[in-house]
Image: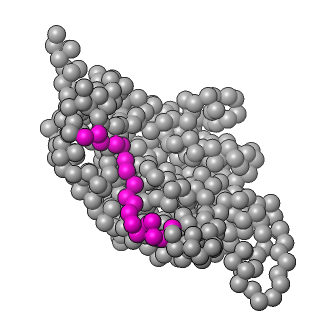
């Protein structure tokens, strides 16, 4: 029987009347697909993260696909990345006909280990796809040093990292500025801000931005907005094979309101992360997430590494019985049937740290709506799971 005062979900989107009214405004306008709201959202997002260009798409998976195609990834090429990420990261590589090359994560964070990249580079390496996992920025300085020395494009999977930042060349820089060639974001409901679903690409390259816009709309030479606003008849042409990767104006209108909330949401999430550290600080056998001095996470997730003797499923079930939702550590694509066959991936280093994190880490609830009382309940439930293991050992 649950002893919690209330159920605590793993995450909750922050949505209110402002988003309701924004969606209603678009519906009343009669223009609900990609249009003026998308254009406004793109400009506001670009301004927020400090990017010269931002292009909205249907989700982050399609953003990653376009990013990889834009830097020239094609059949037979290889892309260095992590197995330790949601499967969409590597699926986007396979959608290009390319092969993911998996390297391990750093020992104290859940991001790609830059020291392993150079040895994984081969004659077919076409790009490096790094993942700002759980909102924690990657070590971009080290990644870019390797990439520039080998002249390899860098794509940032920033699905979880809207609102995160790093110190870059001595100054604060938002993830998405971008530091690499292209950054890709997600607006899924589990993320810090949401449009229901949706994605965004940012880049400093006008040429890349033009390709995104062409390919997201079937390869059409003229956008719907240009045709509908023209006083002359326009016949479009289809200059390349493209996709239907558009965001709707309903989504974009919601996204604009979400963007206005971003700073407040991140501040609250960082406060909750500090509370978790306070309530869990006395448990030396529980490894708390590490934030480097040069990074500022949005704390999209708060992931803890359990003591070796504490079974992950047992801990999660113990907490669920008390009304507290958790999630297991980040999946590893190389362990999934889709990537078990010959030629579906190449292992670029041992992946022991990635596998250990999947098997021994859990993500604790984190939403900006949480109160200190909620954090205390989660911490007590986790402590109870650890105490149960010690009791069994002493019996």
At x 53%, y 46%, the residue is 117
Relative to 380, residue 266 above or below? below
Image quarter for residue 312? Answer: top left
Residue 333, image x, y percentages: 55, 36
Q: Which residues are magenta?
A: 6-23
At x 71%, y 49%, the residue is 96
289 inside magenta stretch? no
Relative to 324, residue 127 above or below? below
9 inside magenta stretch? yes
Q: Residue 143 versus residue 202: which sits nearer the camera?
A: 202
Q: Residue 349 versus residue 313: which sits nearer the camera?
A: 313
Residue 59, image x, y percentages: 58, 56
Task: Kindly give the residue lying farthest to the top in the view shown.
Answer: 395
Task: Kindly give the residue lying farthest to the bottom in the view shown.
Answer: 231
Q: Residue 200 versus residue 202: which sits nearer the camera?
A: 200
Relative to 219, residue 79 above or below? above
**Residue 224 shown left or right of residue 362 in the figure:** right
**Residue 37 shown left or right of residue 18 in the figure:** right
Residue 72, image x, y percentages: 71, 58
In which quadrant is the N terminus drawn?
Answer: top left
**Residue 259 shown left or right of residue 368 in the figure:** right
Image quarter for residue 320? Answer: top left
């Amino acid at each position: 029987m649950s002893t919690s005062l209330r159920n605590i979900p793993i995450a909750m989107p922050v949505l209110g009347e402002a988003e309701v009214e924004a969606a209603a405004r678009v519906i009343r306008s009669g223009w609900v697909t990609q249009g003026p709201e998308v254009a406004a959202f793109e400009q506001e997002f670009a301004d927020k993260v400090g990017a010269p260009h931002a292009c909205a798409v249907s989700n982050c998976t399609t953003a990653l696909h376009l990013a990889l195609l834009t830097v020239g990834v094609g059949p037979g090429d290889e892309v260095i990345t992590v197995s330790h990420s949601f499967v969409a990261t590597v699926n986007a590589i396979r959608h290009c006909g390319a092969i993911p090359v998996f390297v391990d994560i750093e020992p104290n964070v859940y991001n790609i280990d830059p020291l392993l990249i150079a040895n994984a580079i081969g004659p077919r390496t076409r790009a490096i796809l790094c993942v700002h996992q759980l909102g924690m920025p990657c070590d971009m300085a080290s990644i870019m040093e390797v990439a520039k020395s080998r002249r390899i494009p860098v794509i940032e999977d920033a699905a979880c990292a809207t609102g995160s930042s790093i110190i870059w060349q001595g100054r604060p820089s938002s993830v998405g500025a971008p530091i690499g060639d292209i950054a890709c974001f997600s607006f899924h409901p589990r993320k810090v801000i949401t449009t229901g679903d949706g994605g965004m690409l940012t880049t400093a390259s006008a040429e890349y931005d033009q390709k995104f816009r062409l390919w997201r709309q079937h390869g059409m030479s003229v956008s719907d907005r240009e045709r509908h606003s023209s006083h002359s008849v326009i016949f479009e042409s289809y200059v390349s094979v493209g996709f239907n990767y558009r965001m709707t104006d309903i989504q974009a209108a919601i996204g604009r309101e979400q963007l206005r909330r971003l700073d407040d949401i991140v501040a609250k999430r960082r406060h909750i992360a500090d509370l978790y550290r306070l309530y869990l600080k006395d448990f030396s056998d529980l490894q708390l997430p590490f934030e480097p001095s040069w990074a500022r996470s949005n704390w999209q997730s708060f992931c803890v590494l359990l003591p070796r003797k504490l079974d992950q499923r047992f801990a999660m079930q113990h907490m669920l019985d008390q009304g507290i939702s958790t999630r297991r550590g980040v999946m590893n694509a190389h362990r999934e049937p889709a990537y078990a066959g010959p030629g579906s991936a190449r292992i670029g280093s041992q992946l022991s740290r990635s596998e250990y994190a999947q098997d021994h880490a859990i993500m604790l609830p984190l939403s900006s709506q949480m109160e200190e009382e909620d954090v205390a309940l989660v911490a007590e439930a986790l402590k109870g799971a650890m105490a149960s293991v010690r009791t069994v050992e002493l019996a």
